Amino acid sequence: MITRSRSELLSRATDALQHAGNAEAEVLVRDVASSLTRFANNTIHQNVSERGTRWRARLIDGRHVAAAETSGDSDDAPGRLMKAAHQALRVAPESDPSPLPHPDGAEDSPVAFAGSTAAATAEQRAAMVETVVRAAEARGLVAFGYVSTDAVATAIANSAGLQRQATTTRCSAVVVLRGEDGSGYAARHAADISGVDVGELSAEAVETCERNQNAVAQPPGDYEVVLSPYAVVELLTHLGWMGFSALAVQEHRSFMRLGERLMHERVVIRDDPRSEALFPFPFDAEGVTSRQVPLIDHGVCAGVVYDTPTAMHDGVASTGHSLPQPNTWGPFASHLEMQAGDTPRAELLAPIRRGLYVNRLWYVRNVHPLRTIITGMTREGTFLIEDGSLGRAVRDLRFTQSIVDALSDVRGVSSERLVELGEDESGVSAPWLHLGSFMFTS
Amino acid sequence: MRDLAERALDAAAVSGAGYADCRVVSRSVQAITVKNGEVVSVDVSDDEGANVRVLLDGAWGFAATDRLTAEGVEVAAREAAAVARASGRVQRNPTVLLPREAQRGEYTTPADRDPFGVSVEDKIALLLAADAAMAGEPRVTVRTGSLEFVREHRFFAASDGSITDQTIIESGASLDAVATSDDEVQARSYPNSFGRHQLCAGYEAIEAMELAQHAERIAAEAAALLTADQCPAGTMTVILDGSQAAMQVHESCGHPTELDRVLGYEAAYAGTSFLTPDLLGHFRYGSNAVTITADATRATGLGTFGWDDEGTPAQRVELVRDGVFNGYLMSRETAAQLGMESNGTVRGDGWPRLPIIRMTNINLEPGTSSLEEMIATTERGVYLQTNRSWSIDDRRLNFQFGTQNGWEIIDGKRTRLVRNPLYSGTTPEFWRSCDAVAAEPEWRMWGVVNCGKGQPSQLMHVGHGAAPCRFRNVHVEPAR
């Protein structure tokens, strides 16, 4: 459990500014309490707990900028931090640092927080694992996965008067069940541990695993597909890395052509840091209020996310998507969601005569960012779709596919959605998607 | 550090632990980044903390803290014991660690020039000189250069009497040139892509990279790639440069020989392995030209140390000998399950993370050929340089890699530059098709700084010794 309240943390950040001297200063501090119970072969094999406080300072003196980080909760931590930052500043050459943001008057809300998660114990996590393992053993399956609980208090203050604070929690449960010749995956994530129903999670994994046995080889080629939200999340996060950043657009590395239609009109993607389902967080690593940003609006490139440096470049306001400054990565869309459609999930397969259902994509990597080409494998649940129904299991296939091309032929979007974590562990909300074409290469 | 570790071990024993170990880790990092002629940042970071791992009634518990006081580490030890008791609620086969001889000693990375002793001004000047060399190519629109230096002090003590004290020093650098046009983006990197090329060494490693001398070349290549022909498609001979060979070893040999994966410990995340124990000692993994070692004793590798994070001495083992699958990367716990002993490959990412099986330096041992000879004896193929993308299935069989550029080879001659090359295959078939590995003069140690594994996620720095090598009958195509 975190030991300092967020207001206490903010007070310490503000106090640290007093060590800034004549420089403009920003102090970001995070107090983390993180626990994860991992299981394999129906046994808890790794079970960890971590407590720590991480400090970061940015100092700006005219055209000079430097940053320092340190750890620890001791009284001398702020002093050590600012001393290190001053030492770095003294040798930093002239550059063109972006200014510290001023307070924007916004509330420090909404925030994903549940006291029950912050207070969760190792016994609670083990009990949740036990539920999964019992469900697996009852069906002759073997369970793997983890249950985690995290609490993070964040405070940021700068010498322009900005002061922000928020404490978030998250509980995750991820399960892979394996049978004699195949496996099934399911995951749930919520701010409140009581919102993670491991019984329902286990039932989903059992169903997928039992269906995914004795898979047959299917020839590679172009298939009509239905992707589950676990798979769609991969498409969304890779679009984010490749092109939803203003810096990628400014550097001509992005596929985004603002105002142009690139995808099917059913495609609506936004970044929404205030969404209740997406672990809302009110500000970015500069302390700027994070705003909802339409990215793809009915297939049309509608916007990108900004931090202060990229916003100044384009003469607009930051959208509050900064990573710790200064950096070369640019802003980051960390609360992606795709709008649900109007087709019940159960009806999504109905129009498909022959295709593939993909539960999960794995080891997805960018192959050509400008063309949004990615490659990866299917995993833990790939099935034939025949005459509108889910058929037998298919061996995992490699795909190599342009995401923009795939999202140009969207034939159905489910009315239900799931939240899954992207590879960077940010929450992403996605529906089931029926796509007209998806290329499997081996 | 010793006092803190002893307090933690005492508290663990009082809490009922049958075995406990403690690591006190402090890490200092200096990172300098230059972009398009300007210094973006001079970052310094210090991070220190301790962790305690306990085995209690056959179940594991682990707790980490940055409260480096006697009270702080004792709280962590009691927390680890409480976590272990919770683990005991879901145990099918209690863990047993076999007794061993206590390990004691000190180790420090050999370094001619302390990288933290070199002035920041000199480091910035080095990066700006390289940036200026790239700036001569107008089609290169994004130029980035970075340096990173790490000093990590790792103190380890265990309830079996082991005490080791190690200081690891790393030095790394990278240059990236990104060229853009209306319809294309191409990048070239030096010495390697995706992060940096990094070694366990002092500043002499940076000087040996000769950044400025290579900067103009990669800028010109990035620009040329914008209009280069697409890589040819078909089944052909592939020659990998050393850095891509290192990546191939990493993904298709390093990870599948991790015994925790084989035993299912990573089944829900990183995956399992096709190299099951029944294959050990006789499975034809590659051709006779392929010998792959895990060597934590090899100079300059990012996996070079005195002892691993369980206190097992660094060692060299053959994972693949003359093409035959010969060994695993093993911890004390997993080795015992095969009736074997750990070979010292357990590593944790700083103080917060539980040490798990990780690669050390996984090396493709030198052969007898040379790049020049390989090209001269290739009728039709491509020579591929510097990784651009990598993907492999959860059993480490079906892979697809992309590289930043390729050179078409026709009738023994390196001909035209080609863009967007991809090659794919299945691990054992690919390595069985290896008919040549370059000899020692072209063999060098590469560093990978972004190897991810474990939950919570851990990033590890690992080494790969490799040289250019050749593979026959490989599927090649362009990304389009």
Image (cartoon, grey):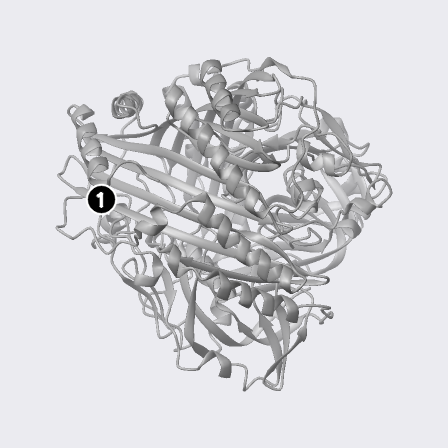
A308 with respect to B379 (left or right): left
Is A420 above or below relative to B161? below
Q: Quadrant of the C terminus of chain A?
A: bottom right
Q: Amino acid at mark 1?
A: Gln
Q: Percent position (x, y) of residue B324?
A: 84, 40
How many neighbours does mark 1 have within 10 angstroms: few (below 14), some (14-19), or many (20 or more)?
many
> Which quadrant is the N terminus of chain A positioned in?
top left
What is the secondary structure assignment of the residue under circle 1? strand
Residue at numbered disc 1 = A165
The front one of A75 and A297 is: A75
Give the residue drawn at x 43%, y 24%.
Answer: B74
Q: Visible in this render: residue B217? A: no
In this rendered view, identify the residue nearer to me: A156 or A225: A156
Above-or-below relation of A318 to A405: above
Q: Is residue B191 left or right of residue A308?
A: right
For the question of whether residue B264 can be seen, the reply is yes
Which image quadrant for residue B112?
Answer: top right
Relative height, residue A396 to residue B185 (above, below) = below
Residue B167, horizontal then vertical, whole percent: 53, 18
Say which residue appears at 61% left-offset and 75% top-offset: A356
Q: Nearer the viewer, residue A2 or B289?
A: A2
Number of on-image labels: 1
Identified at 53% across, 36% down, the residue is B61
Q: Position of residue A192 (x, y in %)?
A: 35, 56
Read off the chain for label 1. Answer: A
Task: Give the x, y percent position of residue A368.
Answer: 52, 57
Dividing the picture into quadrants, the one containing residue B294 is top right
